[in-house]
Amino acid sequence: MTLLRSIREVWRSRPTIEGAGVHLKRAFGNQEAPRLDPFLLLDDFRSDDPSKYLPGFPWHPHRGIETITYVLEGDVAHGDSMGNRGDISAGDIQWMTAGSGIVHQEMPRGNAQGRMGGFQLWANLPASHKMMDPRYRDVKRSEIPEVSTEGGAKVKVVSGRVNGVQGPVRDIVTDPEYLDVFVPKGAGFTHPVKRGHTVFAYVVEGSAYFDQGRDPYARKEVGRNYFDMERECLCGPESLVHYGEGDAVSITAEKAAVRFLLVSGKPIGEPVAWYGPIVMNTSEEIRIAFEEYRNGTFIKHR
C-alpha cells in the first residue's frame, strides 16, 4: 500500500544579501539544514533590478559540497579553477561538485528586459566523498527532458526519473531527484519518492494543495520566517514545503496553476561543520581548509 506523504512544516523564504551584494530570498539555510539533510541551502535570486544582482559572486572557494545552479531568466557567467568558462543561460543547469576544493565565480546578467532569475541549491557530501576530485557538469536546456503526465502536469527532469524518463544528471552520491514541475489549474501531480529520503517542494509561482489530506498540522517550532497556514494547507509563492515520511507526494492545483521545484535526496546523518562556503565534518577540517586557502595549497586537482 502506497503511503502519501503529508506536510511536516512550511515556511516562507526570507530576504538576505550574499556575494558582493546580491539581494536574494533564502528558502532555507543553516537554521533549517539539520532537518533537510543532505541539503544545506536553497537561494532564490529572481529580480528585475540589475543593481540587486550585478555585483555577483566574485572568486571564492568551496569544499565538501555540491552547488546546483538553475537559471530561469538571464545568464550567469561562470569561471573556475578547473579551467571551465562559459554562460549558464535560461533553462540551463550547472551541477558542480566541489569535493576536495574548487575556486570559482558566478556573475549574473539580466535578459533584455533586465530580469534575472534562478535558484542555487547546496547539497552536502558524506565524509567518504568530501575530498573527492571536483567535477563540473554544464547541462543545457535542450538536454533536460520534459515529461507530460496523465494527471496533466509537465515535468522537467534534471535528476531522477518520471514515467520512465531519466534526467541527465546521474551518479550523484546522495541519490538526488530534482524536478521542475508545472501543474495547470484543475490538474494534479502524484509522484513516487524513496522511503527514508528527505523531500521538499519550493513554490516558484502560483499555489496548490501539497497535502492530499488537507489536515491542519501543528508547528513545533516558531521563527520569524514561519507563518500560519490556512486549514487546507494551500501553499503559495516562495513557500517551502517540507514533507514527512512516505512513498509518494500528491499535489493538486484546484484554485490556480502552480510551478514548483520538487527535490529529494538520501540523508547523510553525519556531523556538519559549516563556515561560509566550506562544509566539512569537524571544526579542525574547517580550520585546515581556510589555512590551505590562505597559503595557496587549497586546490588539490590538476
Image (cartoon, grey):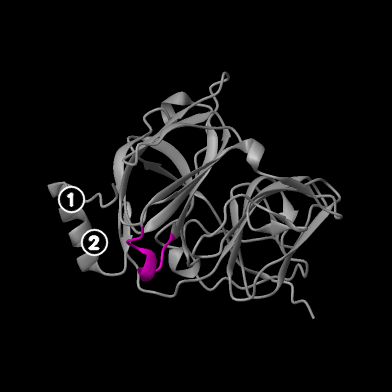
Which quarter of the figure has residue 270?
bottom left
Q: Mark 2 points at which residue?
A: 286
Residue placed most toward the observer, 25 or 193: 193
Residue 300 image position (x, y, % from top left): 26, 52
Residue type at the position of mark 1: Thr
- Compared with 289, 104 (above or below) is above
Q: Find out whether the residues at labels 1 and 2 contact each other: C-beta distance under 8 Å.
A: no
Residue count near mark 2 (Cα–Cα under 10 Å), binned few <14, some 14–19, many ≥20: many
- Compared with 145, 244 (above or below) is below
Q: What element carries label 2?
A: helix
Q: What element carries label 1?
A: loop
Q: Earlier in the sequence, mark 1 or mark 2?
A: 2
- Compared with 41, 34 (above or below) is below
Which quarter of the figure has residue 103?
top left
- Compared with 133, 141 (above or below) is above
Residue 209 image position (x, y, % from top left): 75, 58
- Is 208 included in the stretch rendered in magenta? no
Residue 50 image position (x, y, % from top left): 46, 25
Residue type at the position of mark 2: Ile
Q: Mark 1 points at which residue?
A: 297
Which residue appears at 52% of the width and 50% of the height?
13
Magenta stretch in the rendered image: 124-132
Alpha carbon of mark 1 to alpha carbon of mark 2: how far? 14 Å
Residue placed most toward the observer, 297 or 252: 297
Q: Depth-wise, is mark 1 or mark 2 nearer the camera?
A: 1
